Image (tube, rainbow, N blue to C red):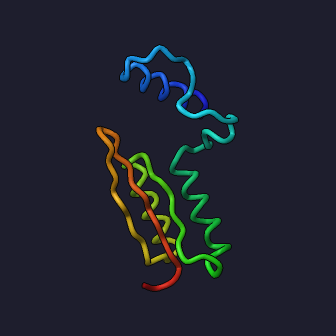
């Protein structure tokens, strides 16, 4: 939500000891958050990828929250997508990952 995005930016700024009151990313509100959060956004993306499964080899998304992974994997399994790769990344204390999936066997 917009409120969660604002609170997250404030927490980050406090942690970095910055005197800023703006969001981490600039853009319109509908570009910065999704009702249902990261989990809903990525599940929607998985459903949309079904429409293009014969046109694209790989689909991928950045996943910020580790807690989002079980729902993503469950949705991919539900849609019978068996080719899934997860790439863990870290920069300092920030950890994230890329989840990629394909409808083609590899």
In depth, the one of 35 and 65 nearer the eye is 65
The residue at the far bottom in this view is 105
Residue occupying the point 51% across, 63% down: 60
Q: Looking at the figure, which quarter contains the C terminus?
A: bottom left
In the displayed structure, does residue 71 sit left or right of residue 47? left
Residue 81 position within the rendered picture, expressed as x and y whole percent measured from the top left: 49, 76
Residue occupying the point 61% across, 65% down: 47
Compared to residue 39, the image places residue 18 above or below, namely above
| Quarter assignment of residue 57 | bottom right
In depth, the one of 56 and 77 nearer the eye is 56
Compared to residue 7, the image places residue 47 above or below, namely below
Residue 42 position within the rendered picture, expressed as x and y whole percent measured from the top left: 54, 56
In depth, the one of 4 and 98 nearer the eye is 98
Q: Looking at the figure, which quarter contains the N terminus?
A: top right
Residue 17 position within the rendered picture, expressed as x and y whole percent measured from the top left: 38, 17
Compared to residue 103, the image places residue 19 above or below, namely above
| Quarter assignment of residue 49 | bottom right
In the displayed structure, does residue 66 sit left or right of residue 24? left
């Amino acid at each position: 939500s917009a409120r969660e995005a604002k609170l997250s930016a404030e927490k980050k700024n406090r942690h970095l000891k910055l005197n800023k009151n703006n969001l981490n990313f600039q853009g319109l509100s509908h570009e910065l958050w999704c009702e249902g959060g990261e989990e809903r956004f990525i599940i929607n993306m998985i459903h949309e990828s079904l429409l293009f499964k014969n046109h694209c080899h790989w689909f991928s998304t950045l996943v910020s929250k580790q807690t989002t992974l079980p729902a993503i994997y469950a949705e991919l399994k539900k849609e019978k997508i068996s080719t899934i790769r997860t790439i863990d990344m870290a920069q300092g204390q920030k950890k994230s990952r890329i989840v990629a999936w394909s409808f083609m066997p590899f």
